[in-house]
Image: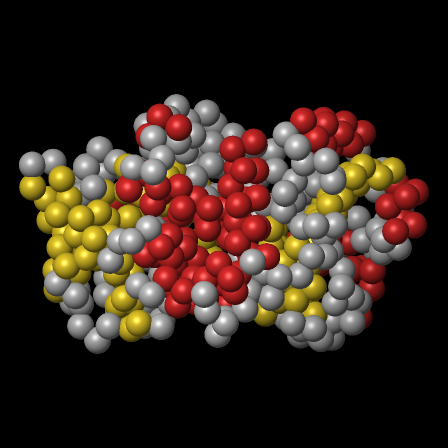
Amino acid sequence: MRYARELPGTADLVVIGGGIVGAATAFHGARAGLRTVLLEARPALCTLTTPVAAGAFRLQFEDRDELRLVRESVDLFLNFRDATGQDRYDPRVSLQGYLWLATTQATAARQRNLVERLRGWGQADVEIMDGVEVRRRFPFVGPDVVQARWRGGDGFVDTKELTFGLAEGSGAEVVLDCRATGFETARGWVTGVRTTRGNISAGSVVVACGPFSGSVAGLAGVSLPVEAVRRHKLWIPALDAVAPGAPMTIDEETGAHWRPAFGGAWVLWTDPSTAPSEPTQAVAPDPAFAFDVLDPARPSSVARVAPFWRDVWEHGAHHWLVQAGQYTVTPDRKPILGPTSLEGLHVNTGYSGHGIMLGPAGSRTVVDLITGAMDRAANPFALERPFELDETPSL
């Protein structure tokens, strides 16, 4: 890793943000031949939103353009050592599948419609199973499940190893404890970044700092339609009830989902009524989240579709830890990639909970727009697009 003790005076590309999206932007920028500097406001890379993510990827996507991105990202995951040219960091890809469970006929119909669309987009390996078949293959599934959709090629990735591997593979200079405080401009162009460690001149700048992207872009007078929404993750270590080889399992009616992790399980759910909040460097978790997802009396409990979680709750003596982060959400739940109204200033944000799986390919898109390898008119994720409200919760 090329940590710089001092802020360099110049760069072809300055990337603001040291999570997965910033690291991926630096990686693609350097690979495009740009002298790249990555700025991170905190004392270490990958310490805010990225490590709280579910660390998973799926090709069961509802949007064709996003499906193209995740396909590209997964190809990078699966060929990480060759793609990055380094072997210090391993994203530990594990293809354990995504299992989406339906308990109503309306949701079952939506599942079938989605699978039909996916097959039309060339994703022919997503299965539909009726309740009998899903319980035969996955005995932990409860009797109320009437149908499931399944793809065994979906899976998990270590988000920290992924981020550090991209940063190291980029060869970019990394400057820590370096917060962006403003921009230098001339004749409608961004010419540099002001920081807490001095100023750096830049040919191009990418804002890729997750929930802080809106406020950082605002320093240049650029308004982004993004909001920060708190979301939680419950970690239960040493939980034998969840097999290490189990899939990501999602209650499609509630959005509650879980996966094996570190000898136990992560349980995640975003309450759709959660109001946006101000971006913060210290996202305060609500300990009551554990009750929302574990207590069988709650409508969002994971016991709704898998009865073994009731046994976990009744046992009662398991240790757990509640963590919190923030989604960076756009009105249509799709990322914002590319140029802004200030020439030379680009954004790479708004992944709405999908930054791990979309961010690597989305970052390549941003760099291609900077270098001219991609025409602006071909970008479906442009800032100036019409944003149609999507009420579907992000998983």
Residue drawn at point x = 43 percent, y = 57 percent: 20
Residue drawn at point x = 7 percent, y = 36 percent: 187
Q: In which quarter of the image is residue 103?
A: top right
Task: Please name whichever residue, 362 or 375, is drawn nearer the observer in this view of the structure.
Answer: 375
Quarter occupied by the C terminus = top right
Q: Which residue is most to the left?
A: 187
In this rendering, would 156 be left or right of 66?
right
Residue drawn at point x = 92 percent, y = 50 percent: 136
Measuring from the top left, give residue 252's x and y in whole percent.
70, 41
In this rendering, would 353 be left or right of 240?
left
Rendered view: 242 above or below 332: below
Rendered view: 139 above or below 1: above
Q: In which quarter of the image is residue 222?
A: top left
In this rendering, would 231 be left or right of 192?
right
Rendered view: 223 above or below 73: above
Residue drawn at point x = 76 percent, y = 44 percent: 150
In this rendering, would 268 be left or right of 203?
right
Measuring from the top left, give residue 365's x and y in whole percent.
40, 41
Task: Please name whichever residue, 169 or 142, is drawn nearer the observer in this view of the structure.
Answer: 169
Measuring from the top left, give residue 67's x and y in whole percent.
57, 38
Measuring from the top left, give residue 287's x and y in whole percent.
56, 63
